Image (cartoon, rainbow, N blue to C red):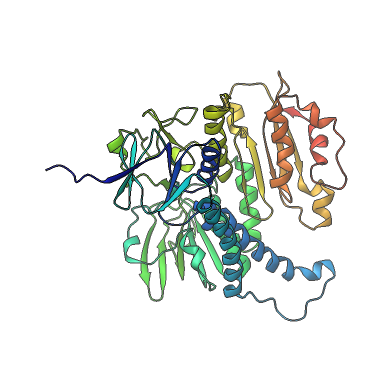
């Protein structure tokens, strides 16, 4: 017996998902005079607006305020009485910031001329149609912008306890007595420092032998020292992790080489990675290819293996950041409308870790530079030499830069320290310009800033040993 025929409507383009690249693409499609539809099953604006960048960095700001207030005496400022954190007000402030962004995206889309907004779960019905709310949207161009979500591993005992993810943490309006974070990478570490500053006891449990293994060892070590300096407990080499209910709290079995074999906490946050939202997207009906992790396979122009279907944002596995998602939109729009063959491979890796002080990183790591076979020069400088850092009494961290000795082009850099997430862009821009490192070395920068020490670092390059 065949399927009942759905009522259909024809569009020039259909976008599934309203993350960072979807709304911008809708605006460009309609500007070009195309009739478009966009589908959202839950929260307009996707991860960044609702449970990612905007809310977490708002919480980071509240946590930093508490941290600075506790240190006020160091700066000659006297605050009478203990510093208290009102978590309900912290959450209310975060909610207000998120609401403004969410409502802004929602109204922008719903008021957009030539765009029809559908609120429901969109699924591919064929290579040129998407079903939603019992209807069928047909189009020659389909853009999948469905994002990703927190990975929940098949961990012994996890189905027997309550646990948090980066999304459900956004609903927390109380102070966990002891927050155990499983996963010592970017998301986990931001929450670790944040909740330690709010006043929780925090333990980070990581299976690897160091934190954020994507980074060089010196970066991992420095970040661990920063967190432990604030009282965050770190348990590494935690093999065979398991959880079980223990009274009003949760026991996390860690089986570490040193330390107690279990950690008893009040709450558990799972921060072990993210997975694409491709499980219930109807990919098989369109014949779309995915990789071993479920990400939709795309070429350097973000086209899938099926003509007329693109995958943009986190779901394509070619970037996991708001800035890469927006760049996906730019690549697609440039190829479709501007006769400009932009591609993913033009993109230089760049991202931040927004602990305090933050990490800004671009291009290759030191390990990658070694493996490239190039003749590499390296420059390094402690943040303790940076006037801005000393003035703020925040001298933790360092900066490091890698240079191709033959071409004098910058291969990569890291700034872990005050203002590192901003200062790194001066290096990134020179890398995109394709000019030698001497362009920065000979520039005159403003004093006193973090960036002014980059030319000094470049004046003391040494062969990478």
- Is residue 427 visible in the rendered image? The answer is yes
Relative to residue 238, is residue 460 depicted above or below?
above
Where is residue 315? Give x, y as percent: 44, 41
> For the C terminus, which image quadrant?
top right
Viewer-proximal residue among 211 and 237: 211
Where is residue 405? Give x, y as percent: 71, 21
Determine which quarter of the picture holds residue 31: top right
Q: Is residue 74 left or right of residue 434?
A: right
Residue at 45% x, 41% y is 36
Determine which quarter of the picture holds residue 437: top right
Viewer-proximal residue among 436 and 110: 110
Where is residue 380? Give x, y as percent: 74, 37
Where is residue 298? Give x, y as percent: 43, 31
- Is residue 274 visible in the rendered image? The answer is no
Q: Is residue 335 left or right of residue 396?
A: left
Residue at 64% x, 43% y is 218
Relative to residue 335, is residue 14 depicted above or below?
below
* Outermost residue toward the top in this view: 406
Residue at 80% x, 26% y is 438
């Amino acid at each position: 017996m065949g399927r009942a025929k759905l009522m259909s409507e024809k569009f020039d383009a259909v976008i599934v998902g309203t993350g960072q690249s979807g709304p911008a693409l809708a605006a460009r499609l309609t500007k070009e005079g195309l009739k478009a539809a966009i589908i959202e099953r839950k929260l307009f604006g996707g991860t960044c607006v609702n449970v990612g960048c905007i809310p977490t960095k708002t919480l980071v700001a509240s946590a930093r305020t508490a941290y600075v207030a506790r240190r006020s005496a160091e700066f000659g400022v006297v605050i009478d009485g203990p510093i208290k954190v009102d978590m309900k007000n912290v959450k209310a402030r975060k909610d207000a910031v998120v609401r403004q962004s969410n409502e802004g995206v929602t109204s922008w889309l719903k008021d957009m001329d030539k765009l029809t907004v559908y609120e429901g779960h969109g699924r591919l019905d064929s290579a040129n149609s998407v079903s939603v709310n019992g209807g069928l949207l047909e189009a020659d161009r389909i853009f999948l912008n469905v994002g990703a979500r927190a990975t929940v591993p098949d961990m012994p005992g996890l189905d027997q306890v309550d646990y948090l993810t980066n999304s459900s943490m956004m609903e927390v309006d109380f102070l966990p007595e002891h927050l155990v974070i499983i996963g010592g990478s970017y998301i986990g570490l931001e929450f670790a420092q944040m909740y330690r500053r709010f006043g929780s006891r925090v333990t980070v449990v990581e299976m690897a032998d160091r934190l954020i293994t994507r980074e060089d060892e010196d970066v991992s070590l420095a970040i661990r020292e920063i967190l432990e300096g604030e009282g965050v407990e770190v348990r590494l080499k935690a093999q065979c992790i398991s959880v079980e209910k223990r009274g009003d709290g949760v026991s996390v079995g860690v089986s570490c080489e040193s330390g107690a074999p279990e950690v008893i906490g009040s709450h558990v946050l799972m921060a072990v990675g993210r997975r694409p939202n491709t499980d219930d997207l109807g990919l098989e009906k369109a014949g779309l290819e995915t990789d071993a992790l479920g990400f939709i396979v795309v070429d350097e122009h973000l086209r899938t293996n099926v003509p007329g279907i693109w995958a943009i944002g986190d779901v394509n596995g070619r970037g996991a950041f708001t800035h890469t998602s927006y760049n996906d939109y730019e690549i697609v729009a440039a190829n479709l409308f501007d006769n400009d063959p932009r591609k993913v491979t033009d993109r230089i890796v760049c991202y931040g870790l927004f602990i305090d002080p933050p990490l800004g990183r671009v291009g290759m790591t030191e390990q990658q530079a070694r493996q490239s076979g190039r003749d590499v020069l390296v420059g390094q400088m402690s943040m303790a030499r940076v006037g801005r850092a000393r003035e703020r009494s925040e001298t933790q961290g360092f900066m490091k830069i890698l240079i191709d000795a033959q071409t004098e082009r910058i291969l990569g850099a890291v700034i872990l320290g005050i203002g590192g997430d901003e200062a790194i862009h001066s290096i990134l821009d020179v890398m995109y310009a394709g000019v030698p490192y001497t362009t920065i070395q000979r520039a005159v920068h403003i004093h006193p800033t973090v960036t002014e020490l980059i030319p000094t670092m470049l004046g003391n390059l040494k062969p990478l040993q």
